[in-house]
């Protein structure tokens, strides 16, 4: 039984949690809208997922301070289902996905995350940092040109339509300004999260000087109402189960792998320990709820989690604040949030990339065994090119084979001669 009553007590610094939660909410908006487009659903379907998953995992999850919402890793799997069978089948799949994750929590299957070696963790972190960076490059595309949605991290590079001239220089300038404020402000004061201050300053500058640059409103309108209870309109037959079960299983696995690896990373950063089984059940409860309220489901978000941790968010209140603030944006403040320049949010995420990438792993490449370096590079490359879950599974398999090979060669035997003259090993 998850003790929700105690969830609100785990907050040592309410001010830091609230301010960091507001910062995270601002960063959630463009991500949720973009991932909704990738999955082939309406923007509000992604925003509702960010609210529902973020709120429930903040209350019932096993890792205070970790932020969950709609993610690209799940969206690229969902797009095929939506294209072939429609959004109602997606909602049914998300319900089944949630049930599978709850079962994983009940049977403590999350403990197998301990089998992931440190080299795979480094590859995971570096790969996601590169994926986040490549995703931000999409903000430097000309929004007046039509593009196919990006289904892999590298698509944004190979698809054309980059900004030109003054438009590109303005976008770059505002992005760099945002990054500079985030870097410099903590050296002056830590009274307000530097990312939140940077967003407010750059937004004020753009509005005050009437600069012509892309804003959140150029992606889509985020105005909406409260999500309504909705039972997916799909036939309750074995044929439906045969359609949705493979997708639900894949989504459940990807969601748990990304969530538990992010949990492990935050554990290391904060020198605390999250509860793995509780996080599995919390993610499952969140996705189960999403399916009944017309949302696309989600999992932990490493980028937004890093924003939260770096801004001082450590308690459950930070995730709760982020989710409720996002809902307030949708209900009451859409017109103001849509005025925020994308360059400001891009600058925030670029600083997340710098903070997430394990730069020390580059210095270690010449000092660690060649096979460990190859595992790091392999997991990083597969995460960028293909899929996080596939990258982690392959990394674990390769690490196990390397360990078995090295162990097989390290055979030590002691020799002795018995009184009868026999040689004993």
Image (tube, helix red, strand yellow):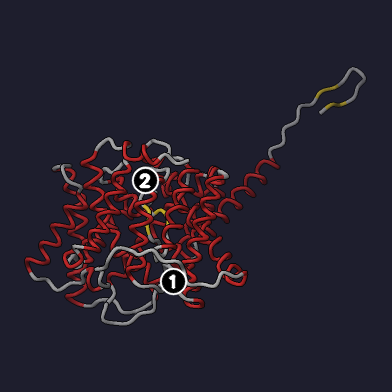
- Image point 70% across, 41% down: which residue? 409
Q: Is residue 399 left or right of residue 379?
A: right
Identify whether 183 is placed above or below 423. Answer: below
Q: On residue 48, which mark appears?
A: none
Residue 200, quarter of the rendered image: bottom left
Residue 166, quarter of the rendered image: bottom left
Identify whether 343 is placed above or below 301. Answer: below
Tell me, yes or no, if residue 416 can be seen here. Answer: yes
* Residue most extreme to the bottom: 145
Q: Nearer the viewer, mark 1 or mark 2?
A: 2
Quarter of the image that includes the C terminus: top right
x, y percent for residue 322: 28, 52
x, y percent for residue 293: 39, 63
Tell me, yes or no, if residue 124 can be seen here. Answer: no
Q: Which residue is mark 1?
A: 151
Indicate the secondary structure of the residue bearing disc 2: helix
Q: Earlier in the sequence, mark 1 or mark 2?
A: 2
x, y percent for residue 347: 24, 59
Indicate the secondary structure of the residue bearing disc 1: loop
* Residue most extreme to the right: 420
Q: Is residue 241 left or right of residue 57?
A: right
x, y percent for residue 236: 56, 69
Label 2 near label 1: C-beta < 8 Å? no
Q: Which residue is mark 2?
A: 59
């Amino acid at each position: 039984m998850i003790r929700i009553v105690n969830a609100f007590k785990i907050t040592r610094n309410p001010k830091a949690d609230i301010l960091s939660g507001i910062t995270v909410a601002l960063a959630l908006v463009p991500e949720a809208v973009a991932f909704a487009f990738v999955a082939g659903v309406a923007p509000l379907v992604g925003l509702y997922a960010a609210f529902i998953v973020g709120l429930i995992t903040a209350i019932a999850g096993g890792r205070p301070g970790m932020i969950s919402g709609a993610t690209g890793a799940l969206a690229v799997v969902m797009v095929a289902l939506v294209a072939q069978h429609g959004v109602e089948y997606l909602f049914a799949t998300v319900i089944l996905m949630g049930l599978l994750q709850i079962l994983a929590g009940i049977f403590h299957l999350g403990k197998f995350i301990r089998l992931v070696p440190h080299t795979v963790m480094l590859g995971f972190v570096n790969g996601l940092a590169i994926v986040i960076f490549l995703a931000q490059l999409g903000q430097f595309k000309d929004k007046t040109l039509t593009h196919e949605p990006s289904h892999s991290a590298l698509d944004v590079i190979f698809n054309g339509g980059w900004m030109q001239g003054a438009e590109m220089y303005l976008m770059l300038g505002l992005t760099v300004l945002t990054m500079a404020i985030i870097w410099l402000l903590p050296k002056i004061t830590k009274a307000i999260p530097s990312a939140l201050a940077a967003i407010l300053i750059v937004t004020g500058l753009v509005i005050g000087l009437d600069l012509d640059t892309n804003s959140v409103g150029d992606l889509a309108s985020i105005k909406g109402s409260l999500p309504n209870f909705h039972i997916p309109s799909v036939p309750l037959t074995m044929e439906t189960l045969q359609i949705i079960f493979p997708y639900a299983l894949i989504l459940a696995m990807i969601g748990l792998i990304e969530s538990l690896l992010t949990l492990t990373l935050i554990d290391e950063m904060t020198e605390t320990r999250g509860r793995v089984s509780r996080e599995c059940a919390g993610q499952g409860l969140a996705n189960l709820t999403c399916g009944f309220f017309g949302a696309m489901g989600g999992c932990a978000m490493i980028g937004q989690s890093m924003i939260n941790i770096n801004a001082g968010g450590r308690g459950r209140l930070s995730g709760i604040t982020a989710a409720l603030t996002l809902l307030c944006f949708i209900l009451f403040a859409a017109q103001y949030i849509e005025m925020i320049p994308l360059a400001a949010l891009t600058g925030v995420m670029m600083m997340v990339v710098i903070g997430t990438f394990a730069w020390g792993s580059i210095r270690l490449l010449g000092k660690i065994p060649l096979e460990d370096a190859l595992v790091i590079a392999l997991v990083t490359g597969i995460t960028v090119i293909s899929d996080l879950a596939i990258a982690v599974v392959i990394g674990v398999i390769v690490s196990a084979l390397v360990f078995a090979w090295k162990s097989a060669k390290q055979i030590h035997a002691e020799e002795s001669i018995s009184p009868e003259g026999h040689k004993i090993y």
